[in-house]
Amino acid sequence: MKNKWLMFGLNMAIVTILFIALAPAYDLFHYINQLFYIAYFYIFIGIIMWVVRGGFFDGITYGFRRFTNRMSKQRDYLDDWEEKPLPSQTVHQSLPKFFLFHGTLLSISLLALLFLYYSG
């Protein structure tokens, strides 16, 4: 997305809709809980993509592909296992940044609401 703030507004709208639909009571505590779920979903996905993008699983994937090719009894001679993209090549560079940015922004909102909740 080009406009990060529009996406942030959309995320807050999703949090509000989930709050209205799922909260047993309409108070700040339950709104903070819904915001927590969405914020840490973004952070979790962002960290997973960051690790994959960094090449952590490339060696493991390459080893499994090579082992499968060598040990397979029914070899597929048209399968070019060395040419297949590795996991780090399949994740676009801007995706982890997108998820981590929005997770961080939602977490800052979460911390602000927690401060408001416990100060009042």
Image (cartoon, rainbow, N blue to C red):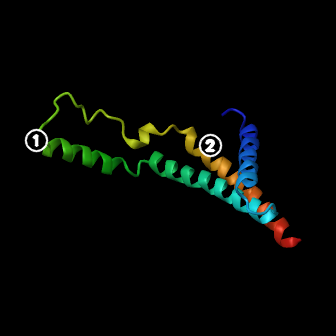
Whichever of labels 1 and 2 marks the residue nearer the N terminus, that label is: 1
Question: Which part of the image, by quadrant, shows the C terminus?
Answer: bottom right
Q: In which quarter of the image is residue 7?
A: top right
Of helix, strand and loop, which one carries label 2?
A: helix
| Residue at the right extreme, as displayed | 120
Q: Residue furthest left?
A: 73
Q: Position of residue 94 (x, y in %)?
A: 57, 39
Q: Which mark is residue 13?
A: none
Q: Are marks 1 and 2 in contact (CB under 8 Å)?
A: no
- Identify the residue under disc 1: 73
In this picture, residue 39 sits left or right of residue 73: right
Q: Residue furthest top?
A: 78
Q: What residue type is labelled 2?
A: Phe
Decide which of 11, 112 is in the foreground and name it: 11
Q: Name the residue under label 2.
A: 98
114 shown above or below 72: below
Q: Please, what is the three-letter code of the amino acid marked with disc 1? A: Lys
In the rendering, at what x and y percent does residue 74 appear? 12, 37
User: What is the spatial separation of the Cα atoms under label 1 and label 2, in whole angstroms?
Assistant: 43 Å
State left or right for residue 33 relative to residue 76: right
Q: Is residue 10 above or below residue 36?
A: above
**Horizontal and vertical percent position of residue 103:** 65, 52
Name the mark nearer the viewer: 1 or 2.
Answer: 1
Please report the residue visible at 55 percent of the width from the left and 50 percent of the height from the top: 45
Give the image location of residue 28, x and y in percent.
81, 63
Q: In the rendered view, does 51 fall on the left or right side of 31?
A: left
Q: In the rendered image, which quarter contains the N terminus?
A: top right
Secondary structure, mark 1, is loop
Residue at x 10% of width, y 41% of height: 73
Residue at the image point whose x is 25% and y is 43% from the top: 65
In the displayed structure, does residue 25 sit left or right of residue 98?
A: right
